[in-house]
Every structure is written in C-alpha cells, then in structure tokens.
Amino acid sequence: MKRHQYRADALIEVLHKAQELYGHLTEDRLLAIAHSLHLPPSRVYGVATFYHFFSLTPQGEHSCTVCLGTACYVKGAMELLATLETESGLRAGSTSADGKLSLLTARCLGACGIAPAVIVDGNVAGHADPEVMRARVRALLDED
Amino acid sequence: MAARTLTINGTLISARSNETVLEAAREAGISIPTLCHLDGLSEVGACRLCLVEIAGSAKLQPACHTTVTEGMEVQTDTPRLKAHRRAIVELLFAERNHICAVCVASGHCELQQLAVEVGMSHVRYEYLSPDCSVDISHARFGIDHNRCVLCTRCVRACDEVEGVHTWDIAGRGTNARLITDLNVPWGEATSCTSCGKCLLACPTGAIFSRGSTVAELERDASRIATIVAARNERW
C-alpha cells in the first residue's frame, strides 16, 4: 500500500497483492485496506466480490480452473466441468471440505486456440479430455 | 451560458449548452421515463429507460447522459423505443420478486408507475424468483432485497449527499446485492448515520421505514434535490 502511496485508486492493485500474499481475502483484511486507503468498506467489499479473481474464502491446496469462454464452451467445456464436478463432488466455485482442491471457472483465458482449456495449479492444459482431466483431479484429491 | 436549439419529437426547443437531453425535454414538458435518474444525484445511465433516438446515430443514447448539441434531432417515443422500454420493465419485474399486492410502496412506487406507463400487461420472460433476504436489523428502516432494482440511487444519495457511502453493490449479474459496510446487517453498519436519505431515494419499496404496511409508504424523492440545491445555493 505504501508503494501506491495509499492512493484510493490503487484499490485493485492492493487487493491483488493481498490475495497473492495471503491466498484469500478476509473481512479483517478488507477492512484494514479500506481504512488505509480511506475508502468506504462497502466499496472495497463491492470491488472484491465483483471480480471473480478475488476470493473471500480460503482456496484449496490445489486449484483446477475450467475455462467457460465461448470457444471452450463450443468445444464441450460444460461437459468437462460436469465430469469434474461429479468426480470431485464439488460445485464449481467451491473448495473440498479437506481443503485439497478448489474447482473454479473462468470466462476465457485467452487460450481459445487450445480449447477447451483447463488450468491445474497454474499450468494450462489444452485440448482437455474429460477422462484425462478426471484422472488428474482424482490424483489431486487422493494425494496426501 | 450559450443556448442550443434542437428538436425533440419535431418540436423546436432551446436549451442551455450544458444541459442533457433529459433536462431539456423535461423543461419543454416532454416526459421521458427514467428510473436510475434522480434529481440532485449524479447520473449512472444504468436503467436504459431514457434511451432516445438521435438522428444520424444508429445507436440509442441515454437522454440522462447525452448533452444537447446544436441542431440535434431527438425522438423520444418511437415504436422501437416503446418496445425496448417495455422489455426493460418486464426484465426488471422478472429479475426479483416484485409482488405489488403485499408491497409497502404499492401506489407510490416508481417501478409500478413505469409498468403502467409503458403498458406492461404481463411479463413475457421467465421469473428468476431468486432467494432474497429481508433485513430489518436497523432500528428505523428495513431493506427487502426482493424489491430492489439495483438502480444505485441509495448508494449515490448516501455517498454524494450524506457523504458516508454505507451502501454499495456486491457481486455481479444476478448475484448482485445491495450491501452495507462489509456485507454486515444494516443495523450493525457503524458508518450509517440513520439519516434516511436512502429511503427517500429508493424508487420501490426495497428500503422502507419500519412499521409501514402495505401501500403505506409514501416518500418524496424530490427532497434529495431540495437538499442538494439548498446546499449549493446556501439558502
């Protein structure tokens, strides 16, 4: 925040950094950010919930993000997501009870050439096949 | 202030150069339906009800946000605009649970009046029937999210007139909800001064005073403009 001179318009950058440092945003952190940047708490909360990137709940150890952009959608991203939801027992946007895996969705990763695209722990997997992805998700869930 | 002459629905009118099409039309006695616009607050152009046709532009322009120009030819009531307006009002009704028969604002509701104005006989869209809560944790006021149209008039009144910004909108799309502070119950929002400007600004029965029952809630939204004018002109 100091780097941005506590400027109110640096809110998104500050939220980015906070999420990067702590993994997710808690209400205490949002309140601290609001006070430091002299912004109303409701504005900070509004921005943090508007963008899918920011998360107010702790994320799992591993993450799996399915792209639902137009190209991926046409290439069967919904079936892929349904397969992964069944396999993991999670609903898109939630984290497993043991904190192992977060199943997320995104609107276009900009990787339409390799649709359908999935990001597993920060690595992009293109031309994702439901069966292959199912096995990967299972491996992440079973790992200890 | 330089004057501009323009035609609205074929009538020649003059307006000040910094006026919007909406202001110019209202001064000339031409009504353009609005919802998110409230005199005294900034414009957001969110409801799209005030869209007008301007000669030379294929796109429809929001009257509340468009400044008048010399020789502008504006149409405010074409069949195309009427169809759009009706669709917008229907979509607003379909988005939440607006049941006039049990609403505190029935008879004094801008959304209800709009539905009558645009001739909405029924809603052609599927109701989303979202699960919305009612918050009556505040000592004097309550908010029923079922009736909220997300016009942000309360947000702007709270921010611009009261200078507090207790209200804001969290989430996006159909999940967007009005919140106070960090999404805490209204009664626990420490920044709220209980001034009631949000109540004045609300076009529907979403924000209501506690204790009012069906059709009892009457407000005068123009008081917001009076407050702003009084401050600016230092009466």
Image (cartoon, coloured by chain):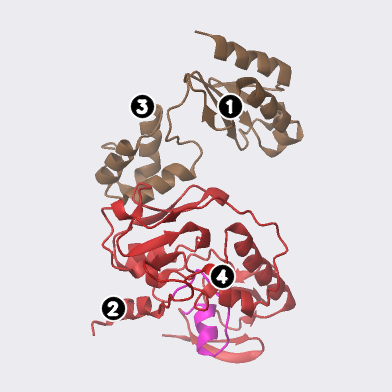
Element assignment for label 2:
helix
- Relative to the observer, which residue lies in front, B100 or B53? B100
Element assignment for label 1:
loop
Residue type beneath disc 4: Cys
List the residue tagged with mark 2: B232
Question: Does B185 sit above or below residue A92?
Answer: below
Q: What segment carries the magenta color?
A: B19-38
Of the two numbered discs 4 and 3 in the rendering, the one whose residue sits closer to the viewer: 4
The residue drawn where x is 42% and y is 68% is: B42
List the residue tagged with mark 3: A21
**Whole-percent x and y of residue B39?**
42, 76
- Relative to the observer, which residue lies in front, A75 or B207? B207
Question: Does A126 sit above or below residue B147?
Answer: above
**Whole-percent x and y of residue B19?**
47, 80
Q: Which chain is brown?
A: A
B28 magenta-colored: yes
Chain holding disc 2:
B
